[in-house]
Image: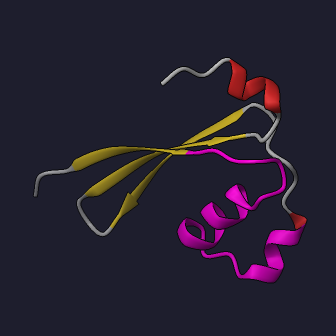
Amino acid sequence: MTLCSLQVLLMGKSGSGKTSMRSIIFANYIARDTRRLGATIDVEHSHVRFLGNLVLNLWDCGGDTFLFSSLTV
């Protein structure tokens, strides 16, 4: 089986639910459990194996505006 690797960047305003979404989809959290998650400071990176042969490299960026000014597309 060949592994496919993709990069996923989660960006948005602070408190918009990026980390909660990641936790519900990939860490089997239920919605009410996400209330105990703190705000992401800086960037959190993780590798998640998904659907058997897909590896997602997740980059969860904190919502502080200074982070957006340092990113280029």
Give the answer, above or below, for where 25 lies relative to 12.
below
Image location (x, y in percent) of residue 58 = 51, 46
Horizontal arrangement in the rendering, residue 64 relative to residue 69 (left or right): right
Give the quadrant of residue 26: bottom right
Instruction: Identify which residue is drawn at 40% across, 50% down.
Output: 56
* Total count of labels: 0
Query: Which of the pair 20/1 is nearer the observer?
Result: 20
Give the quadrant of residue 23: bottom right
Give the answer, above or below, for where 5 lies relative to 64.
below
Query: Which of the pair 29/73 is nearer the observer?
Result: 73
Residue 26 falls within the magenta-colored stretch: yes
Give the quadrant of residue 48: bottom left
Instruction: Identify which residue is drawn at 64% across, 44% down.
Output: 11
Instruction: Identify which residue is drawn at 74% across, 62% down.
Output: 17
Chosen colour scheme? secondary structure
Image location (x, y in percent) of residue 53 = 23, 60
Query: Which of the pair 23/65 is nearer the observer?
Result: 65
Give the answer, above or below, for where 27 lies relative to 73.
below
Image location (x, y in percent) of residue 60 = 63, 44
Residue 65 falls within the magenta-colored stretch: no
Give the answer, above or below, for where 21 lies relative to 41.
below
- Quick one: quadrant of the N terminus? bottom left
Horizontal arrangement in the rendering, residue 31 relative to residue 71 (left or right): right
Image location (x, y in percent) of residue 2 = 12, 52
Q: Which contiguous range is marked in magenta?
A: 10-35
Instruction: Identify which residue is drawn at 33% across, 45% down.
Output: 6
